[in-house]
Amino acid sequence: MKRIDAILHVALAMALGGAALAPLDAQSKDKKKDPDQIGNRDVGTGVNFYSLEKEIALGKQLAQEVEREAKLVDAPIPAEFINRLAQNLARNSDIKVPVTAKMIDSDQVNAFALPGGFLFVNAGLVLKADTEAELASAMAHEIAHVAARHGTRQASRGRIVDFASLPLIFLGGWPGYAIRQGAGLALPLTFLKFSRGFEQEADLLGLQYIYKAGYDPTAFIDFFEKMESLERKKPGTVSELFRSHPNTAVRIKSAQKNVQELLAQQPQYVITTSEFNEVKQQLEKSLNRRKSKPGDTGPTLRRSTQGSPDRVDGRESAPDKDDERPTLKRRNPLNPDMPASAVPEGTARIF
């Protein structure tokens, strides 16, 4: 009983002690609006019962559960691309933990970040993004959640309110609420669904991260407008977790204001790259193959190509063993012998 009383006193002191830090919080808020301060500011301050070490351990445990339950995309090019994009965004963020990003083989539009730097992106999100900058926008938002330690900060807030569960903080437990993902995942809701204030902060920080990484910040606005339109046209395509974010119209208006007021205009921005296009092509090909794969019952039919051969650039091409059109490599106009995927530079938007 004395132990619980002591814990309550510590929790209340931490919760009430925030009033004495008001001037410091004001300075912190100013820095959060300055992209030049990225990396030199602590955006994860606030009541938190988890050390960074415990946060990483918790995230690793949850990530292992995800990998046990979900089918990951293990094709080298998409898998390496998504992790490399995450590393680039992390280098241009306030994050203080290593980042690992993996792709889930699901056509539902979703991405989520677990405490400690574990990021998962659905293949469906990649396919719905028209440009690399749009994909980077969604990933930067999730990385911002990790940088600001929203998962464990929110869990800590919940524990202060629910005094009965406070001892669990020191035992490494968490509330048993769970959210079911499109890929069939059950994870603690506390670490995935954030308060409106935390979502707005992740929008602010994520916008700065893609800007710092060289991407067009207006892609952030374009992507979330697209998600809103997509959900209206085909309900259920976008994950419940994405739909639970704050009102999209409000977010778009806020992002437009932040772009105008906080981000200095650059002479050029990255919009997309040939590598992103190659990744999308691979994912689309894999998705089409899965949809056209015959079931376990009924005859297997093969289309006849006699009299109606496939034609590419005026040439006939026989279908491969999977009855698909061959994938032709685009050529680099500067060097006809070099495929387009070898071109290091992406498409830039000039202002």
Image: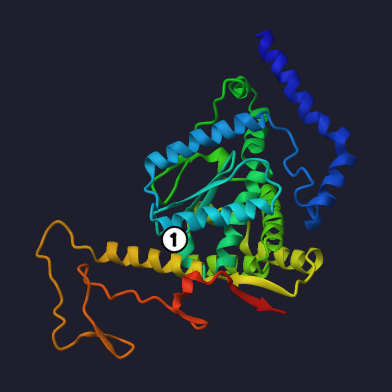
Q: Residue furthest bottom?
A: 314
Residue appearing at x 29%, y 75% in the figure: 326
Mark 1 is surrounded, within 10 Å at the Cα level, by few (under 14), some (14 to 19) or many (20 or more) other residues, namely: many
Residue 22, horizontal then vertical, whole percent:
87, 39
Which quadrant would the C terminus be assigned to in this image? bottom right
Pick whichever, 180 or 293, lies toward us.
Answer: 293
Quarter of the figure with residue 219:
bottom right
Residue 267, horizontal then vertical, whole percent:
75, 75
Is 8 drawn above or below residue 76 in the view shown?
above
In the rendered structure, which amino acid carries the disc numbered 1? Gly
Q: Residue furthest left?
A: 299
Residue appearing at x 44%, y 63% in the figure: 235
Residue 238, horizontal then vertical, whole percent:
48, 59
Disc 1 on helix, strand or loop? helix
* Residue under label 1: 124
Residue 43, horizontal then vertical, whole percent:
74, 44
Please indicate, yes or no, whether residue 347 appears anywhere in the rendered image: yes
Which quadrant would the N terminus be assigned to in this image? top right
Pick whichever, 123 or 174, lies toward us.
Answer: 123
